[in-house]
Amino acid sequence: MTDIGFGLIGTGYMGKRHAVALKAVGTVFNTRLRPVCELLCTTTASGAAQKAAELGFNRSTADWRDLIKDQRVRAIIIASPQFTHSQIARAALAAGKPVLCEKPLGASLDDARAMVAAAASARVANMIGFNYVRTPATQLAHEIIGNGEIGKIVHVRAEHTEDFYADPEAPVSWRTRDAASGNLGDLAPHIINAVLRLAGPIERLVADVQTVHLSRPGATGREPVTNDDQVDFICRFKNRAMGSISVSRVATGKKMGYAYEITGTDGALRFDGEDQNSLWFYERRSQTGRQGFKRMLTGPDHPDYRAFCLGPGHGTGYGDQIIIEVRDFLKAIETGEPVYPTFHDGLEVSRVIAAAFRSTEQRRWVDLAEIN
Amino acid sequence: MTDIGFGLIGTGYMGKRHAVALKAVGTVFNTRLRPVCELLCTTTASGAAQKAAELGFNRSTADWRDLIKDQRVRAIIIASPQFTHSQIARAALAAGKPVLCEKPLGASLDDARAMVAAAASARVANMIGFNYVRTPATQLAHEIIGNGEIGKIVHVRAEHTEDFYADPEAPVSWRTRDAASGNLGDLAPHIINAVLRLAGPIERLVADVQTVHLSRPGATGREPVTNDDQVDFICRFKNRAMGSISVSRVATGKKMGYAYEITGTDGALRFDGEDQNSLWFYERRSQTGRQGFKRMLTGPDHPDYRAFCLGPGHGTGYGDQIIIEVRDFLKAIETGEPVYPTFHDGLEVSRVIAAAFRSTEQRRWVDLAEIN
Amino acid sequence: MTDIGFGLIGTGYMGKRHAVALKAVGTVFNTRLRPVCELLCTTTASGAAQKAAELGFNRSTADWRDLIKDQRVRAIIIASPQFTHSQIARAALAAGKPVLCEKPLGASLDDARAMVAAAASARVANMIGFNYVRTPATQLAHEIIGNGEIGKIVHVRAEHTEDFYADPEAPVSWRTRDAASGNLGDLAPHIINAVLRLAGPIERLVADVQTVHLSRPGATGREPVTNDDQVDFICRFKNRAMGSISVSRVATGKKMGYAYEITGTDGALRFDGEDQNSLWFYERRSQTGRQGFKRMLTGPDHPDYRAFCLGPGHGTGYGDQIIIEVRDFLKAIETGEPVYPTFHDGLEVSRVIAAAFRSTEQRRWVDLAEIN
Amino acid sequence: MTDIGFGLIGTGYMGKRHAVALKAVGTVFNTRLRPVCELLCTTTASGAAQKAAELGFNRSTADWRDLIKDQRVRAIIIASPQFTHSQIARAALAAGKPVLCEKPLGASLDDARAMVAAAASARVANMIGFNYVRTPATQLAHEIIGNGEIGKIVHVRAEHTEDFYADPEAPVSWRTRDAASGNLGDLAPHIINAVLRLAGPIERLVADVQTVHLSRPGATGREPVTNDDQVDFICRFKNRAMGSISVSRVATGKKMGYAYEITGTDGALRFDGEDQNSLWFYERRSQTGRQGFKRMLTGPDHPDYRAFCLGPGHGTGYGDQIIIEVRDFLKAIETGEPVYPTFHDGLEVSRVIAAAFRSTEQRRWVDLAEIN
């Protein structure tokens, strides 16, 4: 085993989850590379020092450039706000350091393109933080589809619905200001990524994006909300399958409605993030009179579960997804080979989002080929 | 109580269900009008005679014109193929006889319009057979929305998914030939009706209609399938809510996927026809830390349930929906007032279907105002 | 087809359901014998006349002896209070008339034994109204077990839980007075019958019976409750399987908790009356990594469903169970052969109940062999 | 923050989970005491050295006595086989070192008593590893009951069902040999602990314990199974509530059937470990016609969830339970106050198990007062 120093930028919600994952991953997966929590960066020196103590990092800094330059930092995780992703990631790659960047890839399609270009030049590991596709259940779905067990895909229904902005009196914040931080920019990437992972590239789509609550309480009275609350789109995949995707942050009652139903000619799969330890599977060719959707609880026979627990059905959680993600990042660092999902995969998601915005503005179907 | 002679046209699946409902409705609901199964009509005299014996009708005929003229027939149920609906219904109305017509209203938008015009002149009860909105659970959903218990509707997701044509080797039939008998023409009306009932009129939509299996086994080898297998559309309602609707007859594993999720600013409702005796209800304003979707089992406190059973959760079934429908028809006959859903409601559904076909052909958003 | 005149005694909840079933059964099942609602009996002449009009009976009487003697009455359904069952049923059998008697078989074990003896002498159809075992799902469970698809049964868990007496302020009634009308006497028979049907005879049991709310509001202030609210028992079946059964009328939140889980060496089944249109099935020998409980929606491939509907998952309801029951009774009348469940099956249930009472009183295991 | 050196004895399934928890707990909960993985012990020196590298411990030993004596080891976790628990725990306590011991407390009731006595003398933290009561959902259940939100408890149904020995061809192992390692001795403690936690002490019980598969494949052909496969018992709690508990390792299809239903006079709760991120809650006094069991997804408003994730419904997993457990142990060490569940709580569970064995042997009700 070899220690490898990590630098982490960002100490919010996701920063903390990455810190925990760095601590746990070696013991969970018996990895050859063992992360050391070396350097933590956030916007002020005192804040960084305090967070370093809390999260268990050796040192801290308020300057991400120092973090990138640091000799003991040999891999970088970016969990700072999305408008910072591109600049930091490109600098890190230019310094030859592997980067795991939180989603969305950048604050704009141009950002995302620049990051992919930088990754292509750098030839070190680059990865985007789509943690949800790492649940054992979704990995299993990918395996079942890949095996042809549901036949040819004919339809995909997917959603990511939460309700953290369902209350019209929830105040404005960074989340209500820029397109990249809105519902389509910030919440949708996860499920779009899942759909592309499971059903392949989208050819064209038509979308409808809406701001439901046009203003919210702010520091100085009601302030306008300048990004979207919900989006629906329908699409065709390159493989001719049809798709219907909904994403909302005002879906009253939904907490983790990251869900999909994939229908094939020989079977179907259903997953719901509100019950992340099961995958529902229907086999068309099973015995007449004995057909039904089967609730398969994930267990040691399924991808990556065994490292967490030997008992099936005992369950993995949100944090475990991040541990799997960091394991993947270590693998990419170690082998020098790209490990899914790379920046390129993040760009593909950004292109779908851009197409959805354009489709709404122009009220028409948009071919993904238009979005280059 | 007063007996009222019924004529029934059609002895297939739905014809039988109507016959059972005619037998049961008086006892279930203690109606003032008591149906007498007077005259049954199907295409051959011998077939009609045999079916009359089986289904318990007094007499039979092979000519629907005779049925309409029959003195003892004072109300008519049309459960024959859809291309016959318009002609028969108009003749019955012209003869001053109340008509309950199975969905879809007619085989085309022109048919539907003609039927509505005939109903307007006739001033007798006219009704369309949207049985699913009669489940106590969906009646309850309507009541909850009407009370404002979920606030203002912001999103509707709905589907009607079944898999009776999921097998690519299922043979051609009348169901695979005309647009009116395809997935969008024949399966979609139920859920479109529910959506209009619960969320109000649609303003515009964009649709994608597809035939998944282009040919199927026929009498002389493989024959082309000339109508659709699945449709997705997204829409805006007049009340500004967004909608996403999917209908499929090739949805492997789905048996009765007539389902909806209605999201409002103050709550949400979920229904799934595969569990028709419950309605899921979320109340945003309920106590922090005690929120969740509640599975409400229908019972005697909910619309129309009490007539079937005094115990909650004991459950009503498919046939009971038809009994409620016939009760509604009797009420319309008795009062002379229109009872929902009338031919006009059927026409509104037909207009949405026509818009979806046009949207697909022209690959664009279609305003419902275009469909007159 | 042949008409057969029915006499019905009792016009309460169950009486009404039987009346509906008599009306519908011929059309649903295309039976050779076609019930005619001939004579209705309840306690007063005017009440009987009014109910006959409501429920659609030709004539009425206030004297069950007249009903039994009536020449046009050729089959009898007893849906009057349980203390009347034995006397009426024995008189009917003595008159050579087939009897379908509501559960429980009688108000006591002696009643039940006398009824079985009378049935043995009479040699006409006798049947007890265990409607719940008639759901297509439970018939399917019986078929799966019979086929050996779950191997040898090793464990049975079952319950019938409702909450109609959960409110401590619900008033006293006939239901709170006699052992036969209490939770163990009146609610438990259904699930005990299901357990015996699915897993075979019980060898011994140990029970705990309890009155939770010792008094309730009555006409003159609080009155004592003199029968039980809940019972738990564990048992051994003759086939060596273990069992655990709970029955309660104070199970807050449960509406139709008639539920069982049958575990075998090769598989398992689960049913819940609050979702009566599905049966959950687990097959131990299915492929590693693809195992799970499968929710099988009942459909035309399952027992008795097809008569109600050609579409799977469209669902049957409580009333449909009674229609199946009356079909079975017609079959027993027609063939002269006993059709399950007969009075004998009712007696076996009564013996289990008697054993549970004795076990509680004597606080010990009781062998069923003791209860003769 | 202060570092605290930990010694861990045992490197199997649970040993690994404790190692991960020691790594993660400080970052997750921002604890003042920060565990250092100091010394790992297993049966051979080379095995211990290898496992120390894998699990990330500083040093290793093959002698647990050395571990206890080690100056840098200031807290001890025992995750070795149950027959070793008593001796090691007593030695550690005698050395004045806090102990977290895996369940069951010891291999016998005498073991358990000796451990409690040692803990009483030692006056350092002692804790037993009942991890499942640490799920946010079960902590929430405890809170709801404590608040009186379901009124007075009248009934408890609980089970812990798994199927790791459902296959009759699964070979013999340590799990099939001693009472303490069998189903009742080793699997049952978790759910018995939950029941005692949620409903209070048991007064008396009657049990039935069974070995379903009497022999299994071994090294030399079939060998006898000398402990039990399943147990059912019914009981009375001191608070007069009735209970019914089932535990099985041959429950075909069950993976994590750690489940309970607690019925009170004003409400009810349901939990199922196969869906550990939700708790179902019914409130009797909620509005008529709007009643139902509510699926509450755990989130930051519920105990201990917020440390893992800010989004509700995102889910915690099995490993997170152990992290909470280690946090509790740190709290006990820090404060010097007992933190639930202590060795005493483990002993109460052992007494119930002893009563169940005695009840089965003597085929009678056993008062817990008999088990001292």
Image (cartoon, coloured by chain):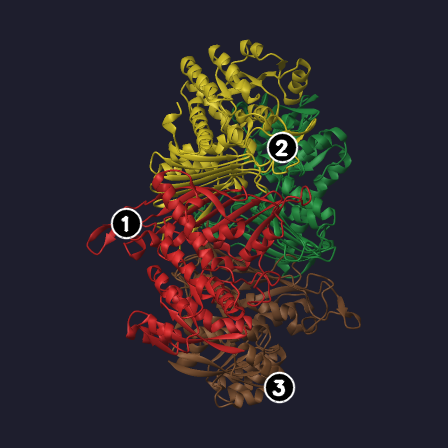
Chain colours: A green, B brown, C red, D yellow
Q: Nearer the viewer, mark 1 or mark 3?
A: 1
Q: Could you say which is closer to the camera, residue A227 or residue D36?
A: D36
Looking at the rendered structure, the secondary structure element under dot 3 is helix
- Badge 2 sits on which subunit? D
Foreground mark, 2 or 1? 2
Mark 3 or mark 2, whichever is nearer to me: 2
Q: How many marks?
A: 3
User: Amino acid under label 2?
Assistant: Ser
Type of amino acid at the residue the image marks with label 3: Ala
Is residue B276 in sight in this rendering?
yes
The one of A116 and A187 positioned closer to us in this rendering? A187
Residue D358: image quadrant is top left
Q: Residues within 10 Å of mark 1 (few under 14, many from 20)?
A: many
Up the image or down, C130 lies above or below A121; here it is below
Residue where numbered disc 2 is placed = D215
- In this rendering, the answer to whether B16 lies above or below A64 is below
Chain on which label 3 sits = B
Reading the image, the residue beneath label 3 is B45
Residue C56, picture quadrant? bottom left
Instruction: Describe the element under mark 2 as helix, strand or loop.
Output: strand
**Residue pointed to by mark 1:** C225
